Image (spheres, rainbow, N blue to C red):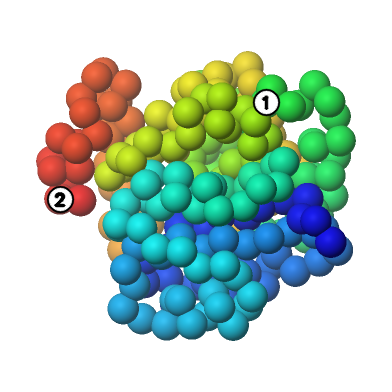
């Protein structure tokens, strides 16, 4: 069966979370999964292959890995998804609804963000992400991105950036062309629990402000030790 969707997942030592991500993609929607690995030294690649995913490699860096993974498939739609994000029930129906509308060929969809945490502060960050996505047109990569291959290629694809590759790309898509999907993506809260539910968003906001002000992503990465 020809896949209706290519799912591209960039990974780097994602063994602790990848199996759950891949399991959440099981269902009746014909898909092909491409895992683009950046040089993992854990069991990431073995997990991906065991799940039937095509595995390719690229230099570490999410932007370059996303771009390399997108080159592998040939489905007319692509879903870019992080390796620590689990799609919730209803995701396939939401994708069908989006891709069935001819007018969406020039748009991109993203999921509603949820964190794998019961901390009340996680709900505040989720609301901030929803506002940022809706009002500023800046959904982040952990919300997934669904886009027609033709539009993705027309826009030039992801750039090989050390960070902000998601922001840089969705700005080319355009705020008016970004549509929330009627399903949730639950992403890992590990980095927020490690760095703090206040400090991590402030750090992200600082990176975003510097990038929008014109600072190169490579300089921001050096500033924040990436």
The Cα–Cα distance between marks 2 and 1, rounded to whole angstroms, is 34 Å
Residue 96 percent across, percent down from the top left: 84, 44
Q: Quadrant of residue 28?
A: bottom right
**111 left or right of 207?**
right
Location of residue 21 in the rendering, given as x and y in whole percent from the top left corner: 59, 67
Q: In this view of the protein, can residue 155 be seen by the observer?
A: yes
Position of 55 relative to 202 (above/below): below
Classify 223 as above or below 175.
below
Task: Specify few, some or many for label 2: CA neighbours under 10 Å numbering under 14, 14-19, or 20 or more.
Answer: few
Residue 107's disc is 1
- The residue at the point 70 percent across, 64 percent down is 25
107 relative position to 161: left or right: right
* Badge 2 element: loop
For label 1, the crowd category at 10 Å Cα-Cα, with few meaning under 14, some 14 to 19 and many 20 or more, is many
* Frontmost residue, 195 versus 11: 11
Which label lies toward us, 2 or 1?
1
Instruction: Return the disc, 2 or 1, that comes first in the chain's sequence.
Output: 1
Q: Nearer the viewer, residue 21 or 67?
A: 67
The residue drawn where x is 63% and y is 62% is 33
Residue depicted at x 79% and y 36%: 98
Residue 50 in the image: state x and y as whole percent.
59, 82
- Local secondary structure at mark 1: loop
For residue 198, side relative to residue 49 (left or right): left
Residue at the disc numbered 2: 225
At 63% from the left and 77% from the top, the residue drawn is: 51
Q: Contact (CB < 8 A) between labels 2 and 1?
A: no
Q: Quadrant of the N terminus?
A: bottom right
Regarding residue 82, the answer to whether it shows in the image is: no
Residue sitting nearer the eye, 116 or 16: 16
Q: Position of residue 44 (x, y in %)?
A: 44, 76
On screen, residue 101 above or below 91: above
């Amino acid at each position: 069966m020809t896949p209706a969707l290519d799912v591209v997942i960039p990974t780097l030592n994602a063994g602790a979370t990848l199996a759950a991500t891949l399991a959440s993609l099981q269902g009746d929607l014909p898909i092909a999964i491409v895992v683009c690995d950046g040089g993992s030294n854990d069991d990431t690649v073995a997990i991906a292959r065991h799940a039937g995913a095509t595995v390719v490699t690229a230099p570490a860096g999410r932007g370059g890995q996303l771009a390399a993974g997108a080159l592998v498939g040939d489905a007319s739609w692509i879903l870019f998804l992080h390796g620590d994000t689990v799609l919730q029930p209803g995701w396939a129906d939401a994708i069908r609804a989006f891709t069935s509308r001819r007018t969406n060929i020039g748009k991109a969809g993203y999921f509603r963000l949820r964190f794998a945490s019961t901390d009340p502060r996680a709900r505040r960050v989720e609301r901030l992400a929803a506002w940022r996505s809706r009002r500023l047109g800046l959904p982040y990569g952990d919300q997934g991105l669904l886009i027609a291959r033709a539009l993705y290629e027309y826009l030039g694809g992801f750039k090989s950036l050390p960070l902000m590759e998601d922001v840089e790309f969705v700005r080319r898509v355009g705020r008016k062309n970004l549509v929330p999907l009627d399903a949730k993506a639950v992403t890992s809260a590990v980095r927020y629990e490690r760095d703090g539910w206040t400090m991590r968003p402030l750090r992200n906001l600082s990176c975003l402000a510097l990038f929008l002000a014109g600072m190169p992503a490579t300089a921001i990465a050096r500033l924040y030790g990436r």
